[in-house]
Amino acid sequence: MGAQFEKTINDFMEARRPAKGEAWDTFEHRAADALVALCESVAGGDEHTPAWAVRPVAQLHIPLSGPAEFAGVPIADSLLEQWRANVSVEPVIVDDDGVPLAFGKRCTFISPKILRAVLLRDHHCRICGSTRGLHVHHLRPRTWGGTDDISGLALVCSTCHRPLIPHGPFALVGNPNVPDGLRRVHLDDLTPEEAEQVGRPPPRPERRE
């Protein structure tokens, strides 16, 4: 994210070159002008235009043998669930010492076509109506048996996404293809039909003493 911020500021500064024959302003002044321009572009934007949340990039290390790792830790299902729709993944093949051998193409788990289709259908957070910082949420998590079909996805903002399953105690249930077809329900209050739609978390492995 720091690299993305630096690149954005530098691009703004580069786009504001002085007229031919004029001297460059100081770096500090040009950087300050770039920040002001960024603030003005946000303030002057159409608040009704949906905007995705910042999509972080995760570099996934894939060894020649053994599980894939992130920051030296094997990928857990819970982390994979967080990445599935809202993170760009860059795979890196590494040797037994962690030295990169090859870099793969940056990608997302869900196709861009599906993401665009969900954005065009929902246009805003299906819980609070916000159009900023939007994520794609699986109504039934993939680790609980869900799929990436558009009928199982919905837009939610960053704030509303945190308490939702599989990490939080709330679920979105109903028909996402109907404008008012979804409602947020605590897991303890689900009807049998809603519980069937949401699915169940996979059983935990038995602890061995």
Image (cartoon, rainbow, N blue to C red):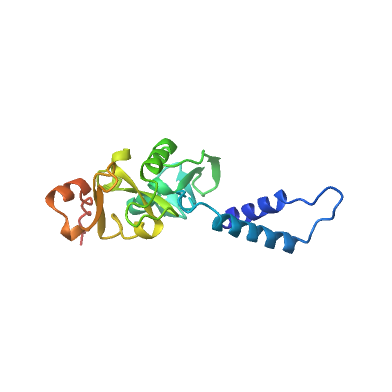
Residue situated in front as seen by the camera: 56 or 194: 194
- Picture layout, residue 42 above or below residue 61: below
User: Residue at horizontal 32%, vertical 39%?
Assistant: 150
The C terminus - image quarter: bottom left
Q: Indicate the position of residue 136 as horizontal and vertical percent values.
A: 37, 48
Residue 188 figure quarter: bottom left
Pinpoint residue 19: horizontal percent, then vertical percent.
81, 49
Q: How many numbered badges does the structure rendering display?
A: 0
Relative height, residue 84 to residue 33 (above, below)? above
User: Is residue 67 at all visible to an observer of this figure?
Assistant: no
Residue 38 placement, left or right of 27: left
Foreground residue, 32 or 205? 32
- Residue situated in front as seen by the camera: 31 or 201: 31
At 55% from the left and 47% from the top, the residue drawn is 99
* Image x and y of residue 2, in percent: 58, 58
Q: Quadrant of the N terminus?
A: bottom right
Q: Residue at x 29, y 60 (%)?
A: 168
